[in-house]
Image (cartoon, grey):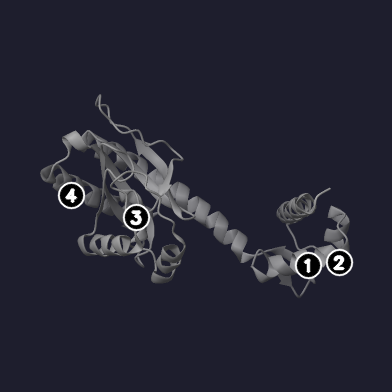
Amino acid sequence: MRTNEVEMMSTVKSADRTLDLLELLAQWGREMSHTEIAEALDIPKSSLTKLIRNLTDRGYLRFVAETKGYRLGDTILKLAQQSNQMRSLVACAEPVLRDITQQTAESCALNQLKGDQVEVVATVISQQRLQSHMRLGDLAPLYAVSGGKAILAYLPDAMREDYMRAVTFEPITKNTISTRKALLATLEEVRKKGFARSMEEYTPGIVGVGVPILSASGFPLGSLNLAIPAVRYSKEVEERAIGILTASAARIQRQYFAE
């Protein structure tokens, strides 16, 4: 067997053990000692020690001195809360999205950050014959779409700087942003004006307009965007779209934080 295959099998085995351990503690409902975990999962104690150390250091496990056992840590709880919050944001946004499309007759979407991309997590499609389809789960580069730029512009400085160092620009269309300098200038304009646009930068023939949905601290929980066929786009259409999106984002924020 080749070296890389052995390493892959070892990595998969380690991942399985990690998930088995987390599931065991979740099902058990109380602290478990090192010995109890090793016996329950049939893991050598030396291997378990390394695994527990890594998970404890990252907050996935917590050692309880009184019982000398381990339980799920705060990181797991935070992940669960974030998942619930995402569902809550979607629930707040869905009726608002329907209203946006009713007012504009254009397709709209709620987007959220996923790694270094933006993901469509809720959408309503225009009933007009010429329309843009934004499907649930669609992913796009942050720099290429209005919803992505609206999120990227409001990320904390450290996160945005990390993104800028790592980003690789792809020429998706002839209008796609292709340099860090151009993207930085665009993001500065987004923060100044409060909205982002994509002028056929991701899909030929489609103009995107997007606004952020911000937490109380100013962190971008997501974004709303409209996808407007270029033949129906004008400055007047954009101004009306921005007004509707901005009011809609504020409505979602009020409902979300009132829960």
Label 2 to label 1: alpha-carbon separation:
7 Å
Q: Amino acid at mark 2?
A: Ser
Q: Identify residue for label 2.
A: 46
**Image x and y of residue 214, in percent:** 34, 59
**Image x and y of residue 202, in percent:** 34, 43
* Mark 4, secondary structure of its residue: helix
Contact (Cβ within 8 Å) of mark 2 with mark 1: yes
Query: Mark 1 or mark 3, which has the lower sequence index?
Result: 1
Instruction: Tell me the mark number nearer the camera, choosing from 2 and 4.
Output: 2
Q: Identify residue for label 1.
A: 50
Q: Amino acid at mark 3?
A: Ser
Query: Mark 1 or mark 4, which has the lower sequence index?
Result: 1
Contact (Cβ within 8 Å) of mark 1 with mark 3: no
* Mark 2, secondary structure of its residue: helix
Instruction: Tell me the mark number nearer the camera, choosing from 1 and 3.
Output: 3
Instruction: Tell me the mark number nearer the camera, choosing from 1 and 4.
Output: 1
Question: Who is closer to the viewer here, 5 or 256?
Answer: 5
Q: Identify residue for label 3.
A: 178
**Image x and y of residue 150, in percent:** 32, 55
Residue found at x 37% / y 37%: 134
Q: Identify residue for label 4.
A: 243
Q: Amino acid at mark 4?
A: Gly
Residue found at x 26% / y 65%: 188
Q: Amino acid at mark 1?
A: Lys
